[in-house]
Amino acid sequence: MATDVTSIPAPPIAGEPGIPRRMALTFVEVVSHPLGAIGVLLVALIVLTALLAPVIVPYNPTAISVKERLADPSLTHLLGTDQLGRDLLSRVIVGTRTAMTVALTSLAVALAIALPLGMIAGYGPRWLDALFILLFDSISSLPMIMLGLAVVVLLGPGVSTVILVIVLYSVPSYARLVRTQTLSLKTRDFIKAEQAMNAGTMRILFRHVLPNVVGPLLILACLDISTVITLEAGLSFLGLGVKPQIPSWGNILSDGFSVIRNSPVPVIAGGVPLILATIGFTFFGEALRDALDPKLNPERKP
Amino acid sequence: MSPALIEARALWVDVPAGRFAFARARPLAILAGVSLAIRPGEIVCMVGESGSGKTTFGRALLGLVKPSGGEILLDGTPLPDFSQRSFRAIRSQTSLLFQDPLSSFNPRQRIGAMIAEPRRIAGMGSARLEDIAGLAQQAGLSDRFLSRFPHALSGGQARRAAVARALSVVPRLIVADEPTAGLDVSNQGGVLNLFPGISKRHDTAFLVITHNRSVVRHIADHIVILYLGRMVESGPAAEILSAPKHPYTKALLEAEPIPDPTRRRTAPPVLGEVPSIAARPSGCEFHTRCPFVQPRCRSEAPGLDDSAEGRRVACHFPLPEPRPAAAHSLRTVSN
Amino acid sequence: MTAPVLDLHGLSVNYGGVFPAVIGVDLAVRPGEIVGIIGESGSGKSTLAHAALGLLPKVARVSGDRFMLAGNDMLTAGRNTLARLRGPAAAMIFQNPMTAFSPVHTLGRQLRDLLWRDRDQTKAQKRERIVKALRDVGTPDPAGKLDAYPFQLSGGMLQRVAIAATLLMRPSLLIADEPTTALDVTMEAQILHLMRTLRDEAGVAILVISHHLGMIAEICDRVAVMYAGRIIEEGPVEAIFRSPGHPYTQALLDCEPALILPGIGRLPVIAGEVPRPGGPGCDFVGRCRHAEERCRSGAVPWQALRADPGHHARCHRSAS
């Protein structure tokens, strides 16, 4: 039977682990370091919460009940209520979903833009590269919060604005990483081999450059998740992020800040998840990077 | 005579601008006017040491390095210019075997897919497993490697995989850069034995770039010797090996130690080292190391003269044919 | 007979207790001798060379009955002993001269650093010694090289400087691991000639490791052949090349293109691959054309060849 050789499945040959096994091995490596284990736990907790939010949320997070405003934590409201009587635990849970949605969407968009831009900058003619570098440097020279504020002023607050700000902030550094990797790949023999076989530029970029630059980029993005979550929370805190009725850790914090003299619980409810998320993703990202680094793990193949 | 398959005329390659950024009077030449014609089905060995430009020549033929001067002709027709588009015709009929085969593979692509790559690029339909396995077999590579990644292959296996890829589109010319580098002696035959067979079966010409004299002895039809980016001698293999005319050729042939303890040399055949291309000697560029140097050699550069049919030497005082008895004394005998 | 500079008996190197790279090696290098080790990739020859100077990482466990370097017991040597020995007892030159030097220091500085033990000498005295050593190895313009950086020199020149560096330390033993593999053939001839001169004039013992049969034949007095971590043959260089006692050595010589007359057609190869070392019986049995039943299991005797007591091979057939 005529099978296309590029669709040959990956049988687990001895000594040649297939992709699932390699992922499992990487996972074990990550978890074997204490910080990595903590990171994995926290990330798992946050991701699960975000995924299961509609199912596990005890109350409607936007349901106002003035009678129960600023209730202390009790068995009916595990974290108490905020100044409008909304259940804080529910708000935090949905806030997790907000944070994850914004973070993953914006990073996905940023990656989707940065990859082609970076590859073109690295592989294409020098003048084009210079142009892109100029563009990247200009954007990244602006302070992040200022940039965020400017965009929000222009477009008004909301989820899409937050995503846009994050994308604008992330693309230059991602694209620069892709560009550097592409530049160094360009000189390697296997790219020259493709050129010698008359491969078109598109083929070289997508089949040969892309798979080899995507790895470091994903790790960078993973490390950035905590920054992005914080950025979203920060903008929401200032009232410039997601619309107030959508629960976000940022606006929980902001609301809690205004009633901090009455009760510390809302601030803690908004702040602690943020801290945990930052710690979790940072530890996870660093442990992942160390586990995947071929220099630190000499047995590991690319 | 029908035109050569591929011909280079006075091919020049300068060091790319941007390196050595300080100003120079003239650009430095890696290749300084090399002319060579390769005929279908013949195996040409290009020999030289570091700085000879031989690897650059192979790459320049395919446009991987941009020539700075001269002409390249394909089937007698010169390329209009040295743009990437002009080289497409040559590339579609030529395969290149890299000195380090593993580095010429995408580390994230399976071997089978890699071998099929030239066909897919050329649009020759889907890559059927039987065809790819057939190519692997021609190259002596077991088909269990087809689903593996490059890092799982040893040096010898990687070379065979590279040969299988090279055969993918039945090339008319294969440029092999140091095909035995990094291979143990017990494996070298595995790669070298493939070449004459491929040459006969598909009438494929070979340009083998090497500094390994043993390789040359066993597979070359023609030999070309480069020094500092210029050709110093060329001709049929048997003649060059038995009766070299250029002192550098003779020194190269004698410099390689023979695996026979009773035939040791008492002194190295030539001293010093290859000059830098930034400081080319005047006149004949080999004069600084030539044991037979004369005053004329220092001032006047010799041209590449046709001394006999197919035989060219660039020397003012080419060596005479050795007498049969004296051929033995070319090696100094010890104990 | 003078005591050997390097005396190995039953030396083994095992990586992490799992992978035996070197198994039961007996080797002696006497002053003024040039001993060669022939081996292909995977034979363990480089591991052996590095073990001789204690250069292997901790995961490599070195063990054996005897391991003496210049009269010092290396099996129990601590870091201080090693520091004392490296240089004066034995020095090493490596395959790639470009990476043997620090790229950010001048050669003069690096060579002077090697003389740190000679605290009583002034800088000027050391400089003189360095220039003399460079001149002795045939470096043109030795004084000028002191201010040069490694990247400014060619591979061949750097290898000369590396040899000069080892000379400065006046070692009893020079270990050369593939010293000419990265060099042009015209430079190789000069380096080989230099090594021979060193032995002739200074009595330095040299241990050369290479897969290049021509080089071994050119300068060695005695040769040991390694395969899958063991020495499978040892003897005088002429005997090894003229009448080898082990089928692997014979097969290797059969494959050597320089020894084959042109026009043969197909070059011979040794089919198969080097097995994982440490298996039962003889490691070459899968690829040997004379393999018998007794070769597959049980220890293989190390016996002298009939004609020559100085020539041994690890093969059942060698005494017959």
Image (cartoon, rainbow, N blue to C red):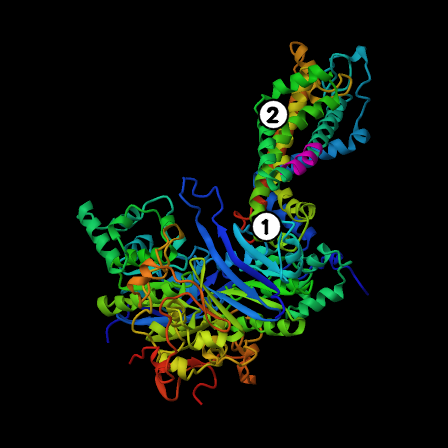
Vertical order, C308 against C69 (above or below): below
Estimate the x, y position of residue C71 in percent, counting from the top left: 27, 65
The quarter of the image holding the C terminus of chain C is bottom left
Q: Label 1's element?
A: loop
Q: Label 2's element?
A: helix
Q: Residues within 10 Å of mark 2 (few under 14, many from 20)?
A: some
Vertical order, A249 against C275 (above or below): above
Residue range corresponding to the magenta coloring? A109-118
Estimate the x, y position of residue A22 in percent, counting from the top left: 65, 51
Magenta residues, dominant SS class? helix
Residue A114 lies within the magenta run: yes
Instruction: Write down the residue under mark 2.
Output: A139
Determine the chain carrying the residue at label 1: B
Instruction: Write down the residue under mark 1.
Output: B82
Residue A217 lies within the magenta run: no
Question: In the rendered image, which quarter is residue B130 located in?
Answer: bottom right
Under mark 1, the amino acid is Phe
Q: Is residue C23 left or right of residue A32?
A: left
* Residue C256 visible in image: no
Q: Is residue A282 left or right of residue C218?
A: right
Residue in the image at 49% along x and 59% along y: B34
